[in-house]
Image (tube, helix red, strand yellow):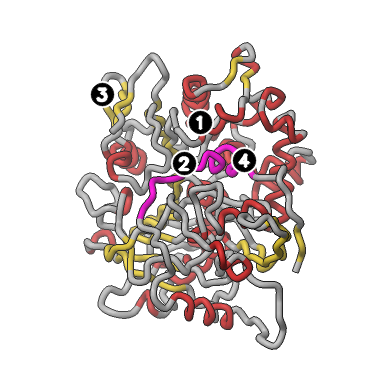
Amino acid sequence: MSLIPTSSACMTLTALLILGACDGEAGTDAGGLPPDGAIERDAASREDAGEDASVAPVAWIGEALASCTRPGEAGGTARGMDLRRVDIDLDVFPEARCADGTGAVFYVRRASAPGSAARWLIQLQGGGACSSPDSCAQRWCSEGTNFGADKLSSQFAPEAGTRAEGVLAARPDNPFQTWNHVFVHYCSSDLWTGRQAEVELDATHPIDAEPVRFRAAFQGASIVDAVVATLRGEAGSVMAGPDALPDLDEADEVVLAGASAGGAGVIYNLDRVAADLREHNVACDGATCPLSVYGLIDSIYGVRLDRLDFSSSSLCAEGLCTWEAFSRADDAAKRAIWAPSLDDSCDAWHAAEGSPDGFRCTDNAYVIEHHVTTPFILRMGLTDSLIGGGMAERGFSVPERGGAAIDIGLFAELVSEQLVALPDLPRTANEGASMTRSPGVYGPACPKHETLSDGPNTYAVRVEVSGTPVSFAELIQAWRADAGGVTSAVTVPGVNPSTCP
């Protein structure tokens, strides 16, 4: 077990520019206390994880900070009965643990139409990240952030089920309406990348300012792997009973979706999950594989860091005065605390090319633009209030705009330019030769951050293309059909408008 001291400077870009604003996704029913039985299940989960009761280890984060435990006001998992809860079996997947040592959970609903039995939508929940001891302690206590302990634990996850909203909603204009639905509760706070089984952290207590040491696990990537494996035919409870799910290995179409931190999870897990699904699919035989796997990424693609002047930002006071200095610190922080499983081909490509820029493999925008080779659809609001607002608050300027300070209007211009260029990735990306098709792109000039779980912002938004309003659902259907419909709908400020709820 490694020990990581407290650090204030090395926080991830997500934490600095997205989470630091404390505006999070709209608060859903996160609950004020763990549901009945959660404490007992917590203890059982730790026994299942193989801990020796005769040894007194450093306390888990939830034990060390028990006096200030508080779920967040943002990004909770809503109680409901649309999707039923499944607990990961820690006897089979001992590494699939939340940050506080509890077992990971997810929610499922079987396909509602026979013709959709082989189609799956797997959504990774969002909710930011913590990549320093202090930021994780603050998150557990929901101190200085709208997120809380529910993003580090399954104790607060709804006991029976959750509501189906956004892309999981059973509504006729949803392209995924009748599919098998899976919603994975986010409890690792590592952008779904971690492989850190256990790490000791020294922090300052968020309330009394005293030193505190605790241990935590960051195993988001392991949780993703365990969910996929559990959905296979040999799995127990998911495949049993009157509402048993079909066998994931018999799928013909699988979408891995996520927004905000969940979108980052798609970025870093998509290629690996796609390869794993193809390896086990019953219809795949070598190069012959009819299985379609693609990603749905939302609210995680901001202005590229190399377009920004950091010397004018508040980060320069911490010694991070260039995008490279920040990116290297960001990369080092993530790798130290999370032991992340990233996009494998990114690290491999940089090693093969002898490139000194391997630190960019933890940069969301860079990985999207160069190393995600599995097809995907990307949505990004041009006036995203959390990401755009966070960049403006930090005081960045933009050299290519004469050193103008970034505001939400300039943020929209820059992101629009990047989105318009994304369909050219097979030609421009480092790994473009491995990309089989151009991504679908949807860029409305709308402020809502994290839209995949929000009905109005999933279905009521329109982007005008050649005089015709195009919805996100229509673009998804056109991209899936690949028959000449609109697959890129991006508002260019001052040229074509958007309609927002």
How far apart in space, not on screen, are marks 3 and 2 (Cα)?
A: 33 Å
Write down the residue under mark 1: 389
Is label 3 in contact with label 1 (beta carbons under 8 Å)?
A: no
In percent of the image, x 50 and y 31: which residue is there? 389
Marks 1 and 4 in Cβ contact (< 8 Å): no
Q: Position of residue 112 (x, y in %)?
A: 23, 62
Disc 3 is placed on an element classified as strand
Q: Residues within 10 Å of mark 2 (few under 14, many from 20)?
A: some
Percent coordinates x, y for residue 113 in the rendering: 22, 61
The residue at 76%/65% (across/down) is: 2
Q: Amino acid at mark 1?
A: Gly
Q: Which residues are magenta?
A: 12-28
Q: Nearer the viewer, mark 3 or mark 2?
A: 2
Q: Which residue is mark 3?
A: 468
Q: Which quadrant, please, contains the N terminus?
A: bottom right
Q: Residues within 10 Å of mark 4 (few under 14, many from 20)?
A: many
| Contact, mark 1 vs mark 2 (Cβ under 8 Å) | yes
User: Around disc 1, counting alpha carbons within 10 Å, would you say few (fewer than 14), some (14 to 19), or many (20 or more)?
Assistant: many
As shown in the figure, which amino acid type bears the numbered disc 4? Leu
Check disc 4 and report the residue beneath it.
13
| Residue farthest to the top, as pictured | 402
CB-based contact (under 8 Å), mark 3 and mark 4: no
